Amino acid sequence: MIYKKFENKLEVYDKSQFNPEHILECGQVFCYEKQEDDYVVFPEDKFAKIVEQENCYQILTETPDYFENYFDLKTDYNQIKRELSSFEILKKPLKYGYGIRILKQNLFETLISFIISANNNIKRIKLILNNLRKAFENENKRKSFPSCAQLLSKDEQFFKMAGCGYRASYLYKVLRQIDEKTLENYQILDTKSLREKLINLAGVGPKVADCILLFGYGRGDVFPVDTWIKQMYNQFYQPLENREQIRNFLTAQFGKFSGFAQQYLFYYQRSFIKK
């Protein structure tokens, strides 16, 4: 991965490994907006604008170290794509979503975001999360994502007013089950044990747990199965309704690269096939 870090920006020259549309539109994150041809991202209390130049992408930010890690710029995705290219089913998705990178996201923000994402669409998820940010705008720098303590101070009605619907009760409960420090401490657990811990939390089912494992904890040996992945499996493998069985088959097939395979397949299935 060829890039340079400056005082107030990053410049990514290898466009074969970095495309903001692929990265931000592949279902892994909701703290972004598209502004004409550019993207802005605002995880936690940070902010960056991504602008395409002829020879690079510029990531304009006051915190280049943060976004160097956030976009996982030190990882060679060409090597990952070489490993996955041996699978026939991935040949087209790898070409279509060539610029995907799995982000390194804040654990607490990922937990709350994906509880809200259950049976929801991206436009509405982003609206709800922005409502949560706006509620604490006077306390936080910019529209920062609220802390566990801030959300813990609110009742269930607050989450309903933010648009969370039936998920309001899950959010109210999960904030009394877990905090940022506990989520960090879970890092030492193996993936199976960590998944069991997450599934015991309010509002966290198998798919949401796998999303938190992949997008928050960076566990590549998981494969979130949603409607699009189930559709792909039934199209290319065999008819099967049980999502846990689909997950187990796909993680056995792709191993430590399961999460990467999932992102390429999900983005291709949802974007290209939908078109």
Image: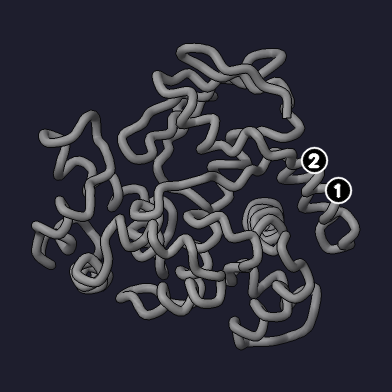
Local crowd size for mark 1, using a 10 Å CA cut-off: few (<14), some (14–19), many (≥20): few
Residue at position x 43%, y 26% in the image: 48
Residue at mark 1 to residue at mark 2: CA–CA distance: 6 Å
> Which quadrant of the view contains residue 24?
top right
The amino acid type of the residue labelled 2 equals: Asn
The amino acid type of the residue labelled 1 equals: Arg
Residue at position x 86%, y 48% in the image: 82
Vertical arrangement, residue 84 with respect to residue 229, above or below: above
Quadrant in which the N terminus appears: top right
Residue 267 visible at all: yes
| Residue 32 in the image, given as x and y percentages of width and height | 43, 38
Mark 2 lies on residue? 78
SS category of the residue bearing label 1: helix
Residue at position x 50%, y 77% in the image: 193
Mark 1 lies on residue? 82
| Residue 94 in the image, given as x and y percentages of width and height | 78, 49
Vertical arrangement, residue 134 with respect to residue 66, above or below: below
Question: Residue 223 — which label?
Answer: none
The residue nearer to you, when weighing 250 against 269, is 250
Vertical arrangement, residue 137 with respect to residue 118, above or below: above
- The answer to whether mark 1 and mark 2 are in CB contact below 8 A is yes
| Residue 151 in the image, given as x and y percentages of width and height | 17, 55
